[in-house]
Image: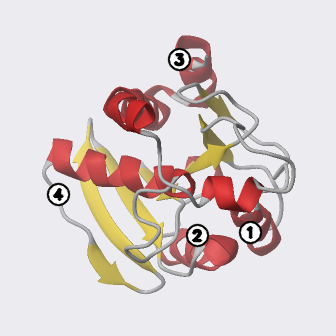
């Protein structure tokens, strides 16, 4: 069984520790915990490892957030991975900071990275792990908020949140989306 895990974010040092990059940050932590490295490949930084006889492919698209679908679609086809074995790790402003919700499909809810994945893969029928970043911004300041760094307090909590997201990701790959949602969703 093969899986594609796509952590969304933007490349570049100026975006590295921003809320919008929580998908990248989580996959980086997974690489540290499981001892593998990302390599620069077509449209993404890519890594792979085996877990409980599952072949898990991880990508961090290098296309910038709004064109994430190019990388996701390419790697789904290149690796011949069925869309039901795709999991996208993404920030979500509609969910309180620290809460995690796995969904098997759903609306892009204004998230340009998810919109592009839907456009290029043919619909919203793929799983996503929504990582809450909260909505602590003034009207009209959403872009500035998602592209701003975490607060000191949030940054201290981030490792625990990312560890739970990693557990949920590995659970998705072994026991499936439904059981993972029942066990982990906030």
108 or 173: which is nearer to us?
108
CA gap between label 4 and label 1 equals: 28 Å
**Residue indicated by mark 4:** 36
Q: Residues within 10 Å of mark 1 (few under 14, many from 20)?
A: some
Determine whether 78 is above or below 159 in the image: below
Q: Residues within 10 Å of mark 4 (few under 14, many from 20)?
A: few
Sequence-first disc among 2 and 3: 2
- Determine the secondary structure under disc 3: helix
CA gap between label 2 and label 1 equals: 8 Å
Residue sitting at 48 percent across and 79 percent down?
Answer: 62
62 or 144: which is nearer to us?
144
| Nearest to viewer (mark 4 / mark 1) | 4
- Determine the secondary structure under disc 1: helix
Residue sitting at 73 percent across and 44 percent down?
Answer: 137
Residue sitting at 75 percent across and 70 percent down?
Answer: 116
Sequence-first disc among 3 and 4: 4
- Quarter that holds the C terminus: top right
Instruction: Using residue 146 as the reference point, say whether residue 27 is left or right of it.
Output: left
Residue 72 image label: 2
Q: Are marks 4 and 2 in contact (CB under 8 Å)?
A: no
Instruction: Using residue 70 as the reference point, say whether residue 110 is left or right of it.
Output: right
**Residue indicated by mark 3:** 184
Sequence-first disc among 4 and 2: 4
**Residue indicated by mark 1:** 121
CA gap between label 2 and label 3 equals: 25 Å
Q: Residues within 10 Å of mark 2 (few under 14, many from 20)?
A: many
CA gap between label 3 and label 1 equals: 27 Å
Numbered-mark total: 4
Q: Are marks 2 and 1 in contact (CB under 8 Å)?
A: yes
Residue 160 image label: none
């Amino acid at each position: 069984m093969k899986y594609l895990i796509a952590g969304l974010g933007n490349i570049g040092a100026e975006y590295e520790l921003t809320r919008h990059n929580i998908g990248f940050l989580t996959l980086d932590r997974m690489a540290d915990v499981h001892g593998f490295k990302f390599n620069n490949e077509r449209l993404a930084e890519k890594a792979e490892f085996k877990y409980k006889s599952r072949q898990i492919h991880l990508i961090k698209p290098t296309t910038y957030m709004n064109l994430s679908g190019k990388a996701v679609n390419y790697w789904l086809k290149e690796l011949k991975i069925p869309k039901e074995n795709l999991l996208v790790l993404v920030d979500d402003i509609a969910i309180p900071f620290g809460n995690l919700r796995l969904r098997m499909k759903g609306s892009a809810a204004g998230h340009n990275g998810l919109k592009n994945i839907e456009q290029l893969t043919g619909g919203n029928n793929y799983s996503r792990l929504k990582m809450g970043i909260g909505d602590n911004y003034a009207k009209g300041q959403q872009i500035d908020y998602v592209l701003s760094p975490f607060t000191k307090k949030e940054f201290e909590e981030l490792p625990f949140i990312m560890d739970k997201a990693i557990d949920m990701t590995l659970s998705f790959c072994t026991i499936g989306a439904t059981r993972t949602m029942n066990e982990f969703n906030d």
